[in-house]
Amino acid sequence: MPSSAVRRLAMAAASSSLSLKQGLLLRPLRTNPLTRPRPSSTSLPSRSFRRCYAAFANENREYVIVGGGNAAGYAARTFVEHGMADGRLCIVTKEAYAPYERPALTKAYLFPPDKKPARLPGFHTCVGSGGERQTPEWYQEKGIEMLYQDPVKDIDIEKQTLITNSGKHLKYGSLIIATGSSASRFPEKIGGNLPGVHYIREVADADALISSLGKAKKVVVVGGGYIGMEIAAATVAWKLDTTIIFPEDHLLQRLFTPSLARRYEELYQKNGVKILKGASIKNLEAGSDGHVAGVKLGDGSVVEADTVIVGIGAKPAVSPFERVGLNTEVGGLQVDGQFRTGIPGIFAIGDVAAFPLKIYNRTARVEHVDHARRSAQHCVKSLLTAQTHTYDYLPYFYSRVFEYEGSPRRVWWQFFGDNVGETVEIGNFDPKVATFWIESGKLKGVLLESGSPEEFQLLPKLARNQPVIDKAKLQSASSVEEALDIAWRSLQVEATV
């Protein structure tokens, strides 16, 4: 698509404005003696007003973020941008590291030593979005108190006090819960905790897996979703015998169509990955040394393995904050369009937040780095400024696999919108393919593999504005480029009506 067309589109596209569900809590925050008057501008305060760490000798903290993932890192940056971090902000995390771009753990972090793997401090937030790298020294320079390896074990809501694992009591003025998700695990009784069985959520998990891969011969990856696909692609770089097992009919069933999944499955098989789909797992078997030795399937057969990586999803890490208000439908903590929970002064962001998805008029919980970043920024701006508009998120997912040096083909796809309705697939996956989701004549979602930067920039505009599109005309497109041009022209027509 011509770049000039994309530029014209950027000017013409209008944001959708669907109404928000009623009944969400929109209470004003209670006044707290710990909260200082907010600045009228975003300029940084004079250095002469900086409070040193000695001011934290007592229990009081003006702002506390619980969690050390992407959401916490981007929230910290937003506090700094508004001049409200220095001497005011405390971050409590169970990890030993400052917040980092977690998606790297199942991508470049797993590359073998000769393939230039990612390592800290190279991917601390906020480098994933082109921002400054926030190393531990960055937090110290900005006057942000960091409490590492000391998770919160309890909360006294009435006294606005957190109790950490070490017994530290922290009084907060405003609390932001950014605890993310924890990896779903196999029960111990079926071998879920055997030596050689791995789950990935943190750097320590990835380090343990890398140690295993260096000695492994046969690897089984359990799960055919994002994590499973990314890990299986990474183990190929180690030249290991790799099998991926999942119970669904095809890879990434919650997003891919059967036709699209078949193309990716063929790509993985060409790279040497064996795929067992529609398979149930009875248990993980141990060898004579107690180390995992195989995966026993529901039909009684056994797949040999000296390393097993389980990627079967994640659960929102709500403990010990259940009393703040759980959403029983999508999980997580219920919040409004400003990420306020039902308890004044308490917010929740990222994976753990069940928020109003304005564009589709429903409540959602999104486990994705893009939402972690955006929800953190929106929440902190709402807390520190007069911002009152509702968070208006457009669902976005992506994956990158086989990106290491020597790979015959690097794969990168992006999806925007909602995967509902009928689908139209264009392209032969050599290398491009695009899938369009159409409901009631409107374009609802679009996925593109191996697109150009200009083409990828078009996708969110299409998904957000949902133009009426001629399905038959789209089906007749001879290439991905032609199909995207048809969609773009449909969008232009919408903008001129």
Image (cartoon, rainbow, N blue to C red):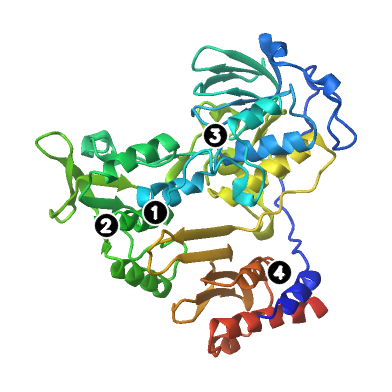
How packed mark 4 is, by other alpha carbons closer than 10 Å (few <14, some 14-19, many 20 or more), is: many
Which mark lies nearer to you, 3 or 2?
Answer: 2
Labels 1 and 4: the sequence-earlier one = 1
Q: Are marks 4 and 2 in contact (CB under 8 Å)?
A: no
Q: Which numbered dot is residue 465? A: 4
Which mark lies nearer to you, 4 or 2?
Answer: 2
Labels 3 and 1: the sequence-earlier one = 1
Which mark lies nearer to you, 3 or 1?
Answer: 1
How packed mark 1 is, by other alpha carbons closer than 10 Å (few <14, some 14-19, many 20 or more), is: some
Q: Are marks 3 and 2 in contact (CB under 8 Å)?
A: no
Tally of marks: 4
Residue 328's spot in the image, x, y percent? 52, 41
Residue at image location 44% in from the left, 81% down from the top: 428
Query: Mark 2 highlights which residue?
Result: 239
Write down the quadrant of residue 82 in the picture. top right
Which mark lies nearer to you, 2 or 1?
Answer: 1
The residues tagged by marks 4 and 2 sit, at their Cα atoms, a distance apart of 44 Å
The residues tagged by marks 3 and 2 sit, at their Cα atoms, a distance apart of 35 Å
Residue 176's spot in the image, x, y percent? 65, 31
Labels 4 and 2: the sequence-earlier one = 2
> Which amino acid, mark 4?
Asn
